[in-house]
Amino acid sequence: MPAFSRSQKLPIFDNPALYEKLDAETLFFIFYNQPGSYQQYLAARELKRQAWRYHKQHGAWFQVRAAGPWAEGKGTRAAGGGGMVMVGSLSSI
């Protein structure tokens, strides 16, 4: 094993307060690269708090925002109405 790789996770990554300070890209990295771990749970919890939603079937995160007047009649409303528009996603690398 290369000297730069860690066989143990650092305890700081078990602190939920740390995840509030991380940007979305870092949270996505943790989510997709720590499957089944407590760190994945913490990253998912923070992404959800930041209005991201995980779609199990697509295996991707989506963020929806309330539709404004600019979205009217342009086919951008999500299925079922509800006034929501999908604005982005990031799936596993």
Image (cartoon, rainbow, N blue to C red):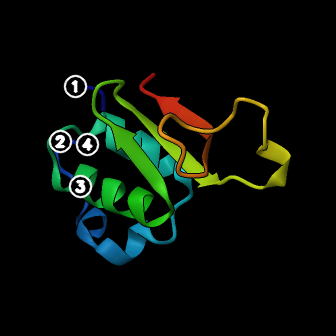
Indicate the position of residue 47 as horizontal and vertical percent values.
Answer: 43, 56
Q: Which residue is mark 2?
A: 7
The answer for how far apart the CA atoms under marks 1 and 2 are is: 9 Å
Q: Mark 2 or mark 3: which is in front?
A: 3
Q: Residue at x 37, y 45 (%)?
A: 30
Mark 1 and mark 2 residues within 8 Å of each other at the beta carbon? yes
Q: Which residue is mark 1?
A: 1
Q: Residue at x 17, y 41 (%)?
A: 7
User: Of 74 and 37, which appears nearest the observer?
Assistant: 74
Note whether 51 is above or below 56 in the view shown.
below
User: Of 65 and 51, which appears nearest the observer?
Assistant: 65
Mark 3 and mark 4 residues within 8 Å of each other at the beta carbon? no
The disc labelled 1 sits on which kind of residue? Met
Query: Which of disc 2 and disc 1 is earlier in sequence?
Result: 1
User: Of 47 and 6, which appears nearest the observer?
Assistant: 47
Note whether 5 is above or below 49 in the view shown.
above
The answer for how far apart the CA atoms under marks 3 and 1 are is: 27 Å
The answer for how far apart the CA atoms under marks 2 and 3 are is: 20 Å
Classify residue 39 by image quadrant: bottom left
Q: Is residue 81 left or right of residue 14?
A: right
Q: Which residue is mark 3?
A: 41
The answer for how far apart the CA atoms under marks 4 and 1 are is: 9 Å
Query: Which of disc 1 and disc 3 is earlier in sequence?
Result: 1
The answer for how far apart the CA atoms under marks 4 and 2 are is: 4 Å
Q: Secondary structure at mark 1?
A: loop
Report the number of discs: 4
